[in-house]
Amino acid sequence: MNPRWWGAWLAEDRKSDRAISARATAGFLIPMLLHMAVGLPASVAVAAIAAHNLAMMDVRGDYRLRVMLLVGMAALLASAGALGVLAATSVVAAVAATAFVAAAAAIWRHVGSDYGLSLSTSSMLLFLVSLDHTARGVAVSSPVWGILAGAGVGLLLQTAMWPLRAQHPLRRAVSDSWIALSGVCDALQAGRPAGSLDTAEGVLRTTLDKTAKQLSGAVRHRRNGLAERLETLSVRAARLGVRVVAVHTALDGLGEGALRQRVEPSLAAVRTSLTNSARSIAVAVVSQQPAHLATCEVRLRRLNGLLESVRARLLAHPEDAGAEMLAELVERVREALPEVLEALRATMPRAGERALFAAELFDVQTWQLKPLATALNLRRNIDPALVRFGARLAVMAGFGAWLYRGLGVPHGYWIPFTLVVVMQPDYGSTRRRAWQRVAGTLAGSLAASLLMMMEPGSAMRLVWIAIGVFAFSFNLKRNVSLAGFGAAFFVVILLQHSGEGGATLALERVGATLVGGVLSFVGAMIFWPVWEHDRFGAVLKNSLQATADYLRRLEFKLREGGALDDETVLAKRRAEAASAAVFSSVGRLFADAHNPREQIERAATLANGNQRVLRLANLIMVGLHEGPGRLSADEARYFAVMTEALAHLAAQADITAASACDPGLESCTAALDTLPSLDTTQHAAAMHLARIATEVRAMLAGS
């Protein structure tokens, strides 16, 4: 046996998946074992499916929240079964209901990146099984009661260990340390009440001591290494806090001189970014969701660019007393960021997974750190890519249902189900999953058929079903081919065991899966026929150019004077629309596994920097009023350097191109670092210009 494979199997990040898979397998087998004496009616089949899916959910957070989520999921699964019964009356009703359940998949993905995919596939499967059994007149009680009974089994398996083993207490303790650090960073902001920093530092120190005590006990008694990695992440919070406060202390020692006025706008952006980054890490360490890790990676990358910008401005004026010392302290903060990210990734068992995530870096307020934020996405605005995905899936699944009911394809409900499993929001993932799913299904069906030719007894069939269910559950998020193999393996044995299948069952299921895979591929070509990375460069370039045009318009208004006009408003709208398109594209780019993570992080960094420039530019726009122009020569130079930098970034917008670096980027960086200090006492636009320059400099550093 390959020692590397065996080492991977024993690795810490797979232990939790094995436990979840074992729990899901038990959930599937319990309803079957309870009814072995009376055969295998269809209600027990749906009960086994419901129990398996609910037991496999890896729900995290507060216990009350977990129960609410599980009960809500059970209600949705039962509703899907009820809809399947009602839709069995006609072909039209079946097609319409199938399209509706498929379209809901986009909503479930929006609400929960971790739970949405499982909920969409399980609800579609239970709907189709209920539809098929009702249409064929299988004499069973309502599938709804079977689904609810199975959901009860899954809920009991989920909660059985809660009284005996607390869920994620160490992660919650480390999360509290990072929340306390965010309080310190927030207290550093200008305008905070006197003594707020002392209070925040006291809270941080108390929290760190409490966390260290809790982790030290776990380190002594646990051998899996997770406690040590969590302890390292908590220590990183302590070290980062010390360095951040050191910068603040050194800055206070400089008084209110020219040096402080020069770097204060940049440091304000750094403090805000530090606060948001610390709170995002607090959420990610508890939720363990790949989407939250991706957000932290982009936030830390942007923070690195801001810190580099501050350091460059300090070193550009070595004649100022204290500039070199302050630059060195800023560099110590920047050097800590890779260590923080490395420590965070080490605590994430699914750090290598891809997922759709909100690319826009909203400010993370305290109320957003409640457990609900780690489980659900409650934003009203759905990503346009998910809207298109829902429409595409509804049309193709409805067509698959028509093939199944209208043409009477045996076991044809696997056609729309394969569509839901295979089809993804982006074309590349759909194409890859289609062939992986078909290959896995073919191999699993063939293996199960060969074994069933041996006419094994009931006990041996249950053992094989358990093996297939475990293989499917364990590989569902790891390997589509192996998951398809496991699913086909246990389904073929299950149906033949229940007397529903014969020698042709395996061929029927393979054929239906093949048709579903082809339809998925065709649907992806019709609705979204290009790779996202092929079009992202043009989207980003358009956004950067629109932002530069907006800044030029603001420069014109400040020079010529006059109140806000329609042309300026139009420039603002164009820039904001282009920025929204970039964020939507970044989300699809991240879900496409074809793109290296480094390229995606760079794309998200530029997108967030561009958006913050727009927000600051809007502050200048709001300050426009009737009267003469008041643009100084230094302010005009700011505008010229920033628009030139955005133009050069737009020229290099294609993150996948292997073109030579634009030499103009280096000259823009040097020009930004040597910009003169602005007199912020004359009007607020000067302060906003200085902050915009910091953001543009950070974009250059992150490019």
Image: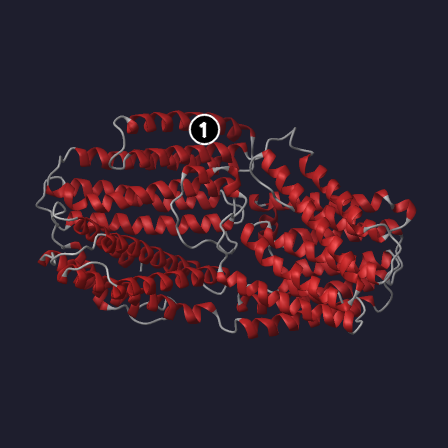
SS class of the residue under badge 1? helix
Residue 527: image location, x then y, percent: 55, 72
Residue 647: image location, x then y, percent: 25, 67
Residue 291: image location, x then y, percent: 49, 51
Q: Amino acid at mark 1?
A: Thr
User: Is residue 622 rendered to the left or right of residue 55?
Assistant: left
Please report the residue visible at 17 percent of the width from the left and 64 percent of the height from the top. 556
Q: Quadrant of residue 248?
A: top left
The C terminus: image quadrant:
bottom left
Q: Give the residue at mark 1.
A: 211
The N terminus: image quadrant:
bottom right
Which of 378 and 451 lies nearest the eye of the viewer?
378
In this picture, is 214 found above or below 314? Answer: above
User: Is residue 444 rendered to the left or right of residue 108?
Assistant: right
User: Is residue 601 rendered to the left or right of residue 15?
Assistant: left
Residue 603: image location, x then y, percent: 38, 60
* Disc 1 crowd, CA 10 A, few/some/many (<14, 14-19, 20+): many
Q: Answer whether residue 116 is visible to the viewer in this image.
A: yes
